[in-house]
Image (cartoon, helix red, strand yellow):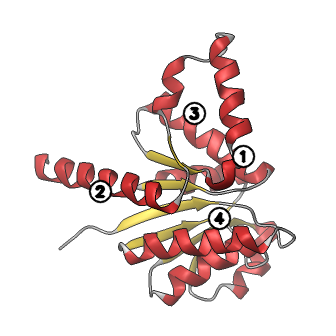
Amino acid sequence: MEEKKFVTILSSCSDEIDDYYGSIARSIAHILASRGYNLVFGGSSTGKMSWAIYDEFSKQGKEIYLFTTEKYADDAKNLPNAKLRMCKTTFEMKSEMFENADLVVVLAGGLGTSSEYETFIEENRSNDKNLTIEIYDENNFYSPYIKWIKTLVDRKMVSADIFESFKISHDRSEFEEHLDLYEIEKRKEAKIK
Protein backbone atom coordinates (compact mmCIF):
# COMPACT_ATOMS: atom_id res chain seq x y z
CA MET A 1 0.00 0.00 0.00
CA GLU A 2 1.31 3.42 -0.95
CA GLU A 3 2.08 5.79 1.89
CA LYS A 4 -0.08 8.91 2.15
CA LYS A 5 1.46 12.10 0.80
CA PHE A 6 0.81 15.50 2.31
CA VAL A 7 1.40 18.92 0.78
CA THR A 8 1.34 22.24 2.56
CA ILE A 9 0.24 25.01 0.23
CA LEU A 10 1.01 28.55 1.35
CA SER A 11 -0.99 31.38 -0.23
CA SER A 12 -2.85 34.60 0.34
CA CYS A 13 -6.00 34.51 2.46
CA SER A 14 -7.25 37.79 1.03
CA ASP A 15 -10.61 38.04 -0.67
CA GLU A 16 -9.58 41.34 -2.28
CA ILE A 17 -7.07 39.90 -4.75
CA ASP A 18 -7.57 39.51 -8.48
CA ASP A 19 -9.46 36.38 -9.58
CA TYR A 20 -6.33 35.45 -11.56
CA TYR A 21 -4.64 34.32 -8.32
CA GLY A 22 -7.64 32.21 -7.35
CA SER A 23 -7.44 30.42 -10.70
CA ILE A 24 -3.72 29.72 -10.17
CA ALA A 25 -4.47 28.31 -6.71
CA ARG A 26 -7.24 26.07 -8.08
CA SER A 27 -5.04 24.84 -10.93
CA ILE A 28 -2.09 23.98 -8.68
CA ALA A 29 -4.40 22.36 -6.11
CA HIS A 30 -6.00 20.29 -8.88
CA ILE A 31 -2.60 19.06 -10.07
CA LEU A 32 -1.54 18.07 -6.55
CA ALA A 33 -4.83 16.43 -5.52
CA SER A 34 -4.93 14.52 -8.84
CA ARG A 35 -1.49 13.13 -8.00
CA GLY A 36 -2.74 11.75 -4.71
CA TYR A 37 -1.63 14.45 -2.28
CA ASN A 38 -3.63 15.27 0.82
CA LEU A 39 -3.65 18.80 2.19
CA VAL A 40 -2.03 20.33 5.26
CA PHE A 41 -3.62 23.74 5.42
CA GLY A 42 -3.41 26.98 7.36
CA GLY A 43 -5.91 28.89 5.26
CA SER A 44 -9.45 30.02 5.72
CA SER A 45 -12.75 30.08 3.88
CA THR A 46 -12.56 33.81 3.23
CA GLY A 47 -9.69 34.17 0.76
CA LYS A 48 -10.03 33.45 -2.95
CA MET A 49 -6.87 31.36 -3.03
CA SER A 50 -7.52 29.57 0.26
CA TRP A 51 -11.05 28.67 -0.77
CA ALA A 52 -9.95 27.44 -4.21
CA ILE A 53 -7.30 25.18 -2.63
CA TYR A 54 -9.68 23.79 -0.01
CA ASP A 55 -12.48 23.33 -2.55
CA GLU A 56 -10.30 21.46 -5.04
CA PHE A 57 -8.92 19.00 -2.47
CA SER A 58 -12.40 18.57 -1.03
CA LYS A 59 -13.96 17.84 -4.46
CA GLN A 60 -11.34 15.16 -5.05
CA GLY A 61 -12.08 13.51 -1.71
CA LYS A 62 -8.66 14.13 -0.21
CA GLU A 63 -7.84 14.40 3.47
CA ILE A 64 -7.58 17.99 4.63
CA TYR A 65 -5.96 19.00 7.91
CA LEU A 66 -6.60 22.58 8.94
CA PHE A 67 -4.13 24.07 11.41
CA THR A 68 -5.45 27.28 12.91
CA THR A 69 -5.48 29.41 16.04
CA GLU A 70 -8.34 30.29 18.36
CA LYS A 71 -8.77 33.62 16.58
CA TYR A 72 -9.90 31.83 13.41
CA ALA A 73 -11.63 28.81 14.96
CA ASP A 74 -15.11 30.03 14.00
CA ASP A 75 -14.10 30.13 10.34
CA ALA A 76 -13.24 26.43 10.48
CA LYS A 77 -16.98 25.71 10.54
CA ASN A 78 -17.06 26.95 6.94
CA LEU A 79 -14.60 24.19 5.97
CA PRO A 80 -16.60 21.09 6.97
CA ASN A 81 -14.32 18.57 5.24
CA ALA A 82 -11.25 19.74 7.13
CA LYS A 83 -9.98 17.99 10.25
CA LEU A 84 -9.30 20.80 12.68
CA ARG A 85 -6.02 21.02 14.58
CA MET A 86 -6.03 23.92 17.05
CA CYS A 87 -2.73 25.67 17.73
CA LYS A 88 -2.01 28.11 20.54
CA THR A 89 0.09 30.44 18.39
CA THR A 90 0.94 31.05 14.74
CA PHE A 91 4.46 29.83 15.60
CA GLU A 92 3.01 26.47 16.61
CA MET A 93 0.80 26.48 13.51
CA LYS A 94 3.79 27.00 11.20
CA SER A 95 5.73 24.27 12.98
CA GLU A 96 2.86 21.79 12.64
CA MET A 97 2.35 22.62 8.96
CA PHE A 98 6.08 22.18 8.31
CA GLU A 99 6.43 18.94 10.27
CA ASN A 100 3.36 17.32 8.70
CA ALA A 101 4.26 18.11 5.09
CA ASP A 102 6.10 15.97 2.57
CA LEU A 103 6.16 18.88 0.15
CA VAL A 104 5.58 22.64 0.47
CA VAL A 105 4.22 24.74 -2.39
CA VAL A 106 4.36 28.52 -2.11
CA LEU A 107 1.84 30.54 -4.12
CA ALA A 108 1.40 34.31 -4.22
CA GLY A 109 0.67 35.81 -0.83
CA GLY A 110 1.19 38.63 1.61
CA LEU A 111 2.97 38.99 4.94
CA GLY A 112 1.54 35.83 6.48
CA THR A 113 2.64 33.76 3.49
CA SER A 114 6.05 35.43 3.51
CA SER A 115 6.45 34.69 7.20
CA GLU A 116 5.58 31.04 6.60
CA TYR A 117 7.85 30.33 3.64
CA GLU A 118 10.82 32.18 5.13
CA THR A 119 10.39 30.20 8.36
CA PHE A 120 10.15 26.96 6.35
CA ILE A 121 13.24 27.76 4.27
CA GLU A 122 15.30 28.55 7.36
CA GLU A 123 13.99 25.50 9.24
CA ASN A 124 14.87 23.35 6.24
CA ARG A 125 18.41 24.74 6.15
CA SER A 126 18.97 24.59 9.90
CA ASN A 127 17.66 21.11 10.63
CA ASP A 128 18.44 19.07 7.52
CA LYS A 129 14.82 18.03 7.03
CA ASN A 130 15.38 18.04 3.27
CA LEU A 131 11.80 19.09 2.63
CA THR A 132 11.14 20.17 -0.94
CA ILE A 133 9.89 23.76 -1.05
CA GLU A 134 8.57 24.85 -4.44
CA ILE A 135 7.99 28.56 -5.02
CA TYR A 136 5.47 29.00 -7.80
CA ASP A 137 6.49 32.24 -9.50
CA GLU A 138 3.98 32.67 -12.31
CA ASN A 139 3.97 36.23 -13.61
CA ASN A 140 7.21 36.94 -11.68
CA PHE A 141 5.37 37.54 -8.42
CA TYR A 142 8.41 36.43 -6.41
CA SER A 143 11.09 38.09 -8.57
CA PRO A 144 11.62 40.93 -6.03
CA TYR A 145 12.06 38.33 -3.28
CA ILE A 146 14.61 36.35 -5.31
CA LYS A 147 16.44 39.59 -6.13
CA TRP A 148 16.50 40.44 -2.42
CA ILE A 149 18.00 37.03 -1.58
CA LYS A 150 20.66 37.56 -4.26
CA THR A 151 21.47 40.91 -2.63
CA LEU A 152 21.83 39.17 0.74
CA VAL A 153 24.19 36.63 -0.84
CA ASP A 154 26.21 39.40 -2.56
CA ARG A 155 26.57 41.22 0.77
CA LYS A 156 27.55 37.98 2.54
CA MET A 157 24.51 38.16 4.82
CA VAL A 158 23.56 34.63 3.80
CA SER A 159 25.47 31.91 1.99
CA ALA A 160 24.77 31.07 -1.64
CA ASP A 161 23.60 27.60 -0.67
CA ILE A 162 20.28 29.17 0.34
CA PHE A 163 19.22 28.60 -3.26
CA GLU A 164 19.51 24.85 -2.62
CA SER A 165 16.75 25.18 0.02
CA PHE A 166 13.96 25.76 -2.49
CA LYS A 167 13.06 25.41 -6.14
CA ILE A 168 11.29 27.91 -8.38
CA SER A 169 8.81 27.17 -11.14
CA HIS A 170 7.44 29.85 -13.44
CA ASP A 171 4.47 28.09 -15.03
CA ARG A 172 2.35 24.97 -14.66
CA SER A 173 4.47 22.94 -17.05
CA GLU A 174 7.68 23.64 -15.14
CA PHE A 175 5.83 23.01 -11.87
CA GLU A 176 4.76 19.56 -13.09
CA GLU A 177 8.31 18.81 -14.29
CA HIS A 178 9.64 19.64 -10.82
CA LEU A 179 6.89 17.54 -9.26
CA ASP A 180 7.82 14.59 -11.51
CA LEU A 181 11.47 14.84 -10.42
CA TYR A 182 10.47 15.14 -6.76
CA GLU A 183 8.25 12.04 -6.97
CA ILE A 184 10.95 10.02 -8.76
CA GLU A 185 13.40 10.95 -5.99
CA LYS A 186 10.89 9.96 -3.28
CA ARG A 187 10.30 6.58 -4.93
CA LYS A 188 14.08 5.98 -5.03
CA GLU A 189 14.35 6.88 -1.34
CA ALA A 190 11.51 4.50 -0.48
CA LYS A 191 13.26 1.62 -2.31
CA ILE A 192 16.48 2.25 -0.37
CA LYS A 193 14.64 2.05 2.97
Per the image, the residue denoted by label 1 is: 114
Residue 76 visible in rendering: yes
Give the residue at x 32% y 69%: 4
Per the image, the residue denoted by label 4 is: 42
Q: Which mark is residue 183?
A: 2
Q: Position of residue 80 (x, y in %)?
A: 62, 89
Could you tell whether 100 is left or right of 85 in the image? left
Helix, strand or loop at disc 3? Answer: helix
Q: Position of residue 128 (x, y in %)?
A: 41, 32
Closer to the camera, 88 or 163? 163
Per the image, the residue denoted by label 3 is: 122
Are circles 1 and 2 on residues that touch, CB within 8 Å? no
Q: CA distance from mark 4 to mark 2?
A: 24 Å
Q: CA distance from mark 4 to mark 1?
A: 13 Å
- Of labels 1 and 2, earlier in sequence is 1
Residue type (three-letter) at the residue carrying disc 2 = Glu
Residue type (three-letter) at the residue carrying disc 3 = Glu
- Of labels 1 and 3, earlier in sequence is 1
- Of labels 4 and 1, earlier in sequence is 4
- Of labels 4 and 2, earlier in sequence is 4
Give the residue at x 49% y 46%: 133
Residue type (three-letter) at the residue carrying disc 4 = Gly
- Of labels 3 and 4, earlier in sequence is 4
Q: Position of residue 47 (x, y in %)?
A: 77, 73
